[in-house]
Image (cartoon, rainbow, N blue to C red):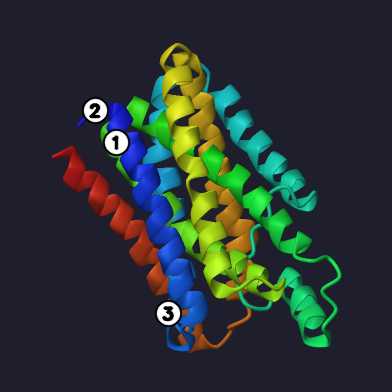
Amino acid sequence: MTVLLWIVASSIVGGVLSVLGAALFALNSRAQHYLGAMVSYAIGAMLGAVFLDILPEAIKLTPNVATLSGTVLFGILLFFILEKLVLWRHCHHEHCEAHELLASEHASGNLGDHGRSGMMIMMGDTFHNFVDGVIIAAAFLTDANLGIVTALAIIAHEIPQEVGDFAILLHSGYSKARAFQLNLISSFASVAGGVLGYFILQTMQSWIPSLLALAAASMIYVAVADLIPGLHKRAQLRDTLEQVGLIVLGVATVGLMGMWMAE
């Protein structure tokens, strides 16, 4: 399979799986009980991909490790600013601020924005998916195994994010079918990002370490700033042990997958 085909296939499969998974969790009350477990596992998968695969590979490719580390730091700050500006909004749990605001508007019948809140979320999510596609392209152009691990880590964190987006669309007045359709369309922005990244990065190989560093920054930020705080709402010992176990399982999955692919 050619590199371009890997990129396109990973982007399409990842987008479809994340949207289907989101719809399952958002519309099935029983499945929602497992969303916390999915979030914990996603944290482990992302951190495992960052520290076991993406950053080690970026360090191998860069002539200046200090600059690479600075890029990671810059990326974390950048994603913080983007989220503050609501250009890139992550919401991974049922009672986030956005959900509470929109739920209260929906309950009171005050939907004066006529779905603009939902469309704003979709615009941010489309941009996010486009960048994910570029990141997948950079990873596959570096190494096929790294591309697969990166794509799987992105899928793991996309499902909780898409659940949040799906719920916001429903609270903004969209039907279930329309919310699913918008999420699916938005997910295919990753294909455009992947294809564009493939052709641009072929002639700009020196950009790949920096893009890998930004990919690492993105996953670190999502895991630490967006996902982990939600876990602290369940502070009982049993819940904590379950969360730690699933995070370790996520890290172990990435580690074992890397070892298996290296053989």
> What residue is shown at x 85% (from left), y 78% (from top)?
110
Nearest the eye: 129 or 221: 129
Give the side of residue 178 with respect to residue 247, left or right.
right
Amino acid type of the residue tagged 2 in the rendering:
Thr
Nearest the eye: 101 or 215: 101
Element type where label 2 sits in the image: loop
Element type where label 1 sits in the image: helix
Disc nearer the start of the sequence (2/3): 2
Quadrant where the N terminus sits is top left
Which residue is denoted by mark 3 in the rendering?
242
> Local crowd at mark 1 within 10 Å, few (<14), some, or many (≥20)?
some
Marks 2 and 3, how far apart at CA: 40 Å
> What residue is shown at x 74% (from left), y 69% (from top)?
98
Disc nearer the start of the sequence (3/1): 1
> What residue is shown at x 76% (from left), y 52% (from top)?
86
**Mark number for residue 2?**
2
Element type where label 3 sits in the image: helix
Q: Is residue 189 visible?
A: yes
Which residue is denoted by mark 1 in the rendering?
6
On the image, the x and y values in percent for residue 75 come to 64, 37
How many numbered dots are placed on residues in this image? 3
Please tell me whether residue 261 is drawn above or below residue 65 in the rendered image: below
Q: Is residue 43 visible?
A: no
